[in-house]
Image (cartoon, rainbow, N blue to C red):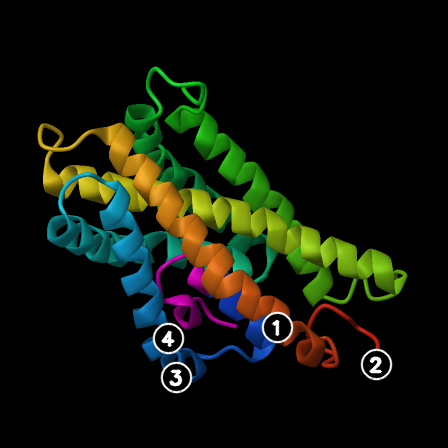
Amino acid sequence: MTVLSLLACEPVPVIWAALAGPGLTLSWAWKGLAALACVVIIKSLVFAGYARMGWIRGFAMMILGNVVSTIPGLVIGVLMGAGPLSALLVGLALLYGTSLLAGRAFDKGFRKTSWSWLTASRFASLSTLFGLGSGILLILITKGTLANLPPLLFLSLKALAFFFLMLCSIGITIGFEAGAVLFLAGHRTVKPQHVLSAAVRANLVVFFAAFLLAALAALPIRMRRSDFLWPYPL
């Protein structure tokens, strides 16, 4: 898998990787662009309904926010590639910097709320820890180091790797999209709390409604392939 095969808004690449396995290629990804466009439209509509900036303006802002979220897609792609340790370390450095930028939206949106503890630096640290955990697990899985483990334990570890990666991915996506909207729309014309709340809702709706259900529906077929979660023939 290459980084270029993950050029899309997050958290789309992580779900695509789970569905396609190591066979994910740029040509395969292009075939899903129509579905990706539908997902972006749904996300933008949900965002516009909660952002309190008008439907047309909110819709357009989230479309642009999805373009910006291609940046964390590249960073997550570095970790998803499960390459050598040096690549992982470079990916983690990029991940921390990217998370720090995305976390600035949390500084503004969570101010004077119960989530005010989630500052940009803390978010970057948590994202890096999640990225490190998922990166190490994916490297061990890809190299076959864990192939001799009991099937249930192997499955649990790979699911944990994708879970860590998904938390990191969604958090960065929300931060980048909310930050892009605040920058493009102007801080004086919109409230950061409304923008961040709308971005959270939009991403959760897209994740659970559009991608998680699709991934679960594909599991029976994918689990019969040796290159997915299960290393043993069923």
Q: Earlier in the sequence, mark 3 or mark 2?
A: 3
The circle on residue 35 is: 4
Q: Earlier in the sequence, mark 1 or mark 4?
A: 4
Q: Are marks 4 and 3 in contact (CB under 8 Å)?
A: no
Query: Which structural element holds mark 4?
Result: helix
Foreground of the two, 116 or 136: 116
Q: Please name the residue that numbered disc 1 is placed on.
A: 217
Q: Residues within 10 Å of mark 4 (few under 14, many from 20)?
A: few
**Magenta segment:** 1-12
The residue at the far top in this view is 112
Q: Please name the residue that numbered disc 2 is placed on.
A: 233
The circle on residue 10 is: none
Q: Earlier in the sequence, mark 4 or mark 2?
A: 4
The mark closer to the camera, 2 or 1, is 1
Mark 2–mark 1 Cα distance, whole angstroms, equals 20 Å
Quick check: 223 above or below 203? below
The circle on residue 31 is: 3
Mark 3–mark 1 Cα distance, whole angstroms, equals 19 Å
- Whether residue 134 is visible to the viewer of this picture, yes or no, is yes
Is 61 inside the magenta-drawn segment? no
Q: Which quarter of the image is occupied by the C terminus?
A: bottom right
Mark 4–mark 2 Cα distance, whole angstroms, equals 31 Å
Foreground of the two, 27 or 51: 51
Amino acid type at image mark 1: Ala
Mark 4–mark 3 Cα distance, whole angstroms, equals 9 Å
Q: Earlier in the sequence, mark 3 or mark 1?
A: 3
The mark closer to the camera, 4 or 3, is 4
